[in-house]
Amino acid sequence: MLKSLQTNEKIILLFFYFIALQPVIDVLTTFSITQLQISATVGVLIRVLYMGVSALFLLINWKNSKIAKFAVIYLLAWGVFLLINLGVSYMEKPLFYFGEEIKYLVKLSYFNVVLLNFVFLFRYFSKHLNLAKVFFHNMMIAAIFIGIVMVVAILTGTSLEAYEWTKTGFTGWFFAGNELGASLAMILPIVLYFAILKTEKLKDFAYWIPFILVSFSLIMIGTKVGYGAVAITLVMGLISAVFALIAKVSHFGNLKVSAAFTLALLIVLGAVTPFTPVFMNTYAHIDLLEDQREKEKEQEPPEEGQVEEPVEEEESNLNSLILSNRDLFLNQFGEYYAEAPVTQKFFGMGYAGNFEEVPKMIEMDYSDVFYSVGIIGAILYFLPILYIGFSAVKNVLKEFKAIFFPHYALVISSIVLGLGIAHFAGHVFTAPGVSIYLAIVAAYFYHHLKTQHA
């Protein structure tokens, strides 16, 4: 064991340092796409290599740990399934693009490979390496880097726009706004917990600067996800600090100061809301819906005696506002699935379903996963995170009051935000640069609970 640890220590730490490198990779990706006009970016190559090394590390250590052994068995089963999925797609899809199918399946597989490797690393090596500390430090480095890049890009006028028209928002030097928002939403609660943990006096406000930078970045993206993540995190932070204060918990720094800082930031958020991009974008979206409604009325006036159905129209507008028209693609995929043969129902319709012209994903991850890999594939795909989730719930119930204190409340918030964003906005399970954050936070929390109740 010790000999193995000495041999692997640098590799183990590299797995965690890779978290801090995520925003650097994303900036390089933006440069490759916008300046070099290269679609096969350096980010894709690095992340595929990282996934391969993660899988290889599990394979090398399968004799040393039950976790590694089960992980290898699972990944082999998933690999066999992917071959079946490709075969079914090749035989049944109206249009089959081999390159796109492979790229999508690799991106989809990234989450589970990285998740299982992090679970193994935490469980097997944390007794000799303080991996929890390494985890928090690298998350903080990533957060600070992103925040500084966003501020500099916006101030210098070099930021990319989050939207092509009508709406406003900024993504700094990061190419994909949805992915940036999802990543920062999961990072934010971890950054707030770190600030609460370190705050002892008013002068410790410096620990809150990373939180302010990340919050600013999320708000300036201009998405509902970004604004919602800041609001939810602040509310959870305030509630958990107050509960811990009432319970006289002493290991979270000065909770009175932390609660005061959190409340002040929540008030500031409320005050600046009317001036935020998401506020303006919401009204822009409503105006756009009104324009579309008027055009439809002009093109197709109601027949004599026909009564309009305002309830259905309001529901449609609400879905459009919340889901940004993703519900339309969801309905399209439902039609694909209803007409698909039995083999595709069980093994999936592959990338973008049974499209006949231009491939387009729903961008709602659970639905995309289900339709792309079918009933069997969806069960197999979500098996690891479901196991970790059930295990976490069982252990959390043993110390239920702890979920109201900052550590559990904010780590759980990070995971829940990731899982929630996966449904409403997508770009979590299907985006390697995002799913790695969900993977490491889930693996950390699973390990922490196991250690507490060992």
Image (cartoon, helix red, strand yellow):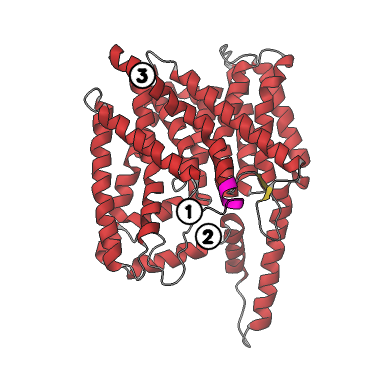
Q: What residue type is labelled 1?
A: Met
Q: Which mark is residue 125?
A: 3
Q: What stretch is highlighted in magenta?
A: 31-36
Which residue is depicted at the point 49% across and 24% down?
135
Specify which label sits upstream in the sequence, 1 or 3.
Answer: 3
Q: What residue type is labelled 3?
A: Phe
Specify which label sits upstream in the sequence, 3 or 2.
Answer: 3
- Residue at the extreme front of the image, as rendered: 36
Q: In this view, does 68 lie to the left or right of 245?
A: left
Identify whether 363 is placed above or below 150: below
Residue 341 x/y as whole percent:
27, 68
User: Are the residues flagged by discs 1 and 3 in contact, CB closer than 8 Å?
Assistant: no
Task: Give the labeled residue for mark 2.
Answer: 326
Specify which label sits upstream in the sequence, 2 or 1.
Answer: 2
Q: Nearer the viewer, residue 375 or 146?
A: 146
Numbered label tally: 3
Label 1 vs label 3, nearer the camera: 3
User: Are the residues flagged by discs 2 and 1 in contact, CB closer than 8 Å?
Assistant: yes
